[in-house]
Amino acid sequence: MRSKGGNLCSSVHWRRVSPMKLRALVNWRNLLLVGAGILVAVAAGVYSAKYLVGTTFEAEHRRFRTVQLGMTETQVRALLDEPYKVYGAAENQTRYYIPGYSYEQRPITNKVLIYVGTEAIAYIYLNHDDRVEHLFVGGS
């Protein structure tokens, strides 16, 4: 059956959308797509940064934990390279801790070697024989 307008189906009504409304609709659609893309990119970046920081901390922590009680200062330096700071008992340091990193309050028997990583820190305490007597590894 044909309707007056010649269409086969009289229940479908086609409406003409003005070019201005069509442009506005396309602009909003594009804006939403770009916004969603930016949101996905930011979320992926935040996730990646959290993952990389976590793995950096774990790697540094493992590296600092390779130091064993009884090792000599020479062995420690060969393993970890040069320390960030070195304090001796003769200097009578009570505030030798690095701000922004965790620490353990402990007097210096002979010497402390401090190694600072991106996310982890190590305080390596040496006795009078220049051997490791205590190790503290923490984070920022």
Image (spheres, rainbow, N blue to C red):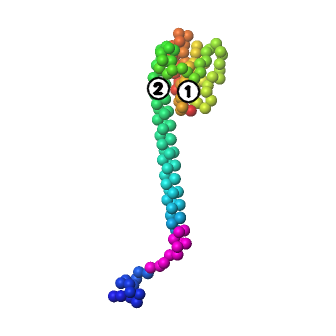
Q: Which residue is mark 2?
A: 63
> Residue placed at 48% from the left, 15% from the top?
75
| Left-right relation of 18 to 4 | right
Q: Start and end of the magenta stretch?
A: 14-24
| Alpha-carbon span between mark 2 and mark 1 | 12 Å
Q: Is residue 49 magenta?
A: no
> Residue placed at 51% from the left, 20% from the top?
81
Where residue 68 appears, x then y in whole percent? 46, 19
Q: Which residue is mark 1?
A: 116
User: Mark 2 belongs to which amino acid?
Assistant: Arg
Q: Is residue 127 visible?
A: yes
In the rendered view, would you say 135 is above or below 140?
above
In the rendered view, would you say 44 is above or below 66?
below
User: Mark 1 belongs to which amino acid?
Assistant: Val
Q: Is residue 109 visible?
A: no
Q: Quadrant of the N terminus?
A: bottom left
Q: Is residue 22 magenta?
A: yes
Where residue 122 appears, x then y in whole percent? 53, 25
| Left-right relation of 67 to 7 | right
